[in-house]
Image (cartoon, grey):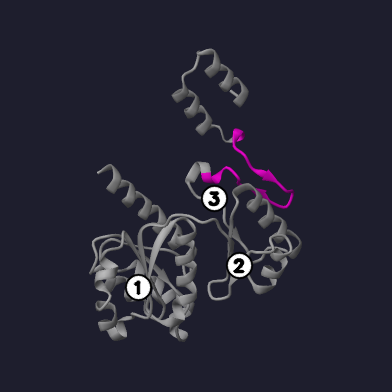
Amino acid sequence: MDLKNILTAVREGSMDIEAAEALLRENPADRDYEEMGFAKLDTDRKKRSGFAEVVYCQGKPDEYIGRIFRKLYEAEGEVFGTRASEHQYELVREFIPDISYDPVSHILKKEKEKEHIGCVAVCTGGTADISVAEEAAQTAEYFGTHVERVYDVGVSGIHRLLSKEGTIRKANCVIAIAGMEGALASVIGGLVRNPVIAVPTSVGYGASFHGLSALLTMINSCANGIVTVNIDNGFGAGYVATQINRLAERGKING
């Protein structure tokens, strides 16, 4: 049943709104996307998931990336890209002159003013992890989350982490980002009642195997309430943390 027939049935009274909504959700053919030949931009994503499409910039050809950013900006009034280079920033500026670029997180964005709700704490083992942490933090902020940054609180000086325990415990979700052996997530998992998202980073000497050592530590943690994303995946952590934060805030309202 196509969209026109569904709407006609609702207008004529032969189908109620709930049944029409169920049909529309089941039929991906009626969902919107922007056909560009080299890309199909998922302009329906925010309606489906609550999060607009984000651009993964690394590897995008020069001749396409600016046009992708412009189309998404036209559709949403804001746009967000990860793993961008300064070269790509210069290319996109030709299409969106006031877009901003952060060389630490490699995030390229133009965003609306918005309310930032709840709280997610983003913690790092060391200063070398901040690039990944900023990808996580700025992702969460872009999607409307209030973020508390707690950087350089690794287990080699655990008193630094304990001095920030109150801030971390108040968060609806904690993102623990660390390289080397990746023990930070386990320590935080033993301190807080809310979910911990562990992010292994590729920081460390040879036997860390570009983050594999931290990854294995985090997925084998004996602390409860920890889930682990891929190596250096700050974006994935910030996205899931925002989902958790939204659910927590909704529960406060409904509870």
Q: Residues within 10 Å of mark 2 (few under 14, many from 20)?
A: some
Q: Quadrant of the C terminus?
A: top left
Question: Which residue bears the numbered disc 2?
Answer: 100
Residue at 54 percent across and 76 percent down: it is: 104
Q: Nearer the viewer, mark 3 or mark 2?
A: 2
Q: Residue at x 35, y 73 (%)?
A: 217
Tag 2: amino acid = Ser
Based on the displayed image, in which of its 4 quarters is residue 98 positioned? bottom right
Dividing the picture into quadrants, the one containing residue 215 is bottom left
Q: Write down the residue under mark 1.
A: 217
The type of residue carrying mark 3 is Ala
Residue 134 forms part of the magenta stretch: no
- The x, y position of residue 38, in whole percent, is 73, 52
Where is residue 148 drawn, in percent x and y? 37, 68
Using the rendered image of the protein, determine whether residue 79 is visible from the camera's viewpoint.
Answer: yes
Q: Nearer the viewer, residue 21 or 140?
A: 140
Q: Find numbered disc 1 in the image and state the secondary structure of the residue it sits on.
A: helix
Numbered-mark total: 3
Location of the N terminus (image quadrant): top right
Residue 160 at what x, y percent from top left? 29, 82
In the visual, does 242 lie left or right of 29?
left
- On residue 52, which mark appears? 3
Q: Nearer the viewer, residue 133 or 117?
A: 117
Q: Residues within 10 Å of mark 1 (few under 14, many from 20)?
A: many
Looking at the image, the residue that sits furthest to the front is: 113
Residue 39 lies in the magenta-colored region:
yes
Q: Amino acid at mark 1?
A: Thr
Q: Calculate the distance from the C-alpha at mark 3 to the C-alpha at mark 2.
A: 18 Å
Q: Which residues are magenta?
A: 29-46
The answer to whether residue 246 is above or below residue 138 is: above
Rendering coords of residue 235 (x, y %): 49, 63
